[in-house]
Image: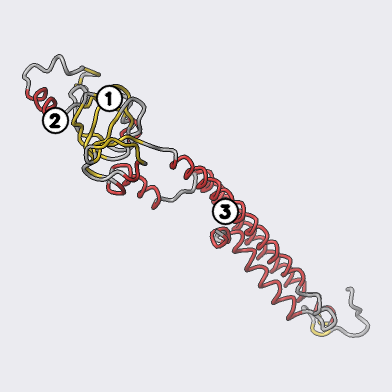
Amino acid sequence: MFAGALDDFMLKLLAVCAVVSITVDMSMAKPEDRAHAWIDGFAIAVAVLVVSGVGSVVDYKKEVAFFEKRNATEDEKSIDIIRNGERKPIHPRHILVGDLVCLKVGDQIPVDGILVEGPLGCDESAMTGESDECHKDIPSVCEEKSKRDDLSKHQTMKAGGVNKHALPSSVIQSGCSVSSGKGKMIAIVVGEDSSLGDIERKLEQDDDKTPLYHKLDKIALDIGKLGTIFALLTFHALMIRFIWEGLIDRNIDLFGGEKGPEDGCND
C-alpha cells in the first residue's frame, strides 16, 4: 500500500524535485553554507514520505475494517443441505457437488444447480439486471410445458414481444435469491467455477478505482504539468538573471566590450 501511495504523479515529481534540489544546492553552495544547503530538498522528501505514509496507513486501516466486517458477515451465513440422507445446516462455502440444497423464500443461492423439487420463483436481477421474477420448476415439468402447442397461458406479450421468463426453467444460478416458493436443488457447479465465483474473480482483476479517483488523478496530472512548465520558465529566468548579474559584476559591457573604471557598474 505504501508503494501504491507513492505511485502518484505529483509525489513522483516532488521526489525528483527533492533530489535535484539537494544536488544543486549542495554543489553550488558556498563552503560555509554547505552544512545546511540540503535542508530545502530534504524537507520536500520528508513531505512526500509523510503524505504517502499517512495515505497508506489510512488505506490499510480501511482494508482491515472491511475484511473484518465481511468475514464476520460471511461466518454468519448458513444454508440447509441434505448429504448422505442427513439434513444439516452448513456454511455455503462447504457445499459439494451432488449435495441437495434446501431453498426457501429469502435465501441467497450459493451455487449453480438444477431444481429437483419445486416450483419456486427466483430474483435474478443481481445477475441479469432484469427485475422480472423467473419461474423455476423441475426438468420434467419444464420440458412438458415447452412442448405444448398452446403457449398462450404461459406467455406474456410485452412491448410487441414474448416475455422470455413466462416459461419455467430448471437451471438456478448462484448470486440470485429465492423470491417465492420453496424447493430443493442439486448442486452442479460450486466455488470459483460457479456464476457468482466467476463474477467475483473478474471483479478482483478489474481496476477498483472509482471514476472520481480517475478525475482527481487527471487534475493532479494537469497541475503537475502546469507546475513543471512554470518551474522551467522560472529556472530559465533565474539563469538569465544570474548570467546578467555575473557579467555586470565583472564590468563587461555586452554591447561595447569591457567597461572602464570610469564607466561604473550601474550604467
Q: Quadrant of residue 81?
A: top left
Quarter in which the N terminus is drawn: bottom right
The foreground one among 132 and 221 is 132
Residue located 24% across and 18% down the image: 158
- Identity of the residue drawn at 92% across and 85% down: 261
Which of the marked residues, 3 or 1, is nearer the chain's N terminus?
3
- Name the disc covering residue 139, or none: 2
Label 1 and label 2: CA atoms lie apart by 16 Å
Q: Residue 159: where, in percent of width, then height?
A: 25, 19
Residue 153 sits in quarter: top left
Considering only vertical position in the picture, is 85 above or below 178?
below
Circle 2 — which element?
A: helix
Q: Amino acid at mark 2?
A: Pro
Looking at the rendered structure, the kind of residue marked 1 is: Lys
- Of helix, strand and loop, which one carries label 1? loop
Farthest front residue? 86
Pointer 3: what residue?
A: 60
> Label 1: how many residues lie within 10 Å, few (<14), some (14-19) or many (20+)?
some
Instruction: Please give the name of the residue rendered at 29% of the width and 23% of the height, measured from the top-left corner.
Output: 133
User: Of helix, strand and loop, which one carries label 3?
Assistant: helix
| Frontmost residue, 78 versus 148 | 78
> Which residue sits furthest right?
262
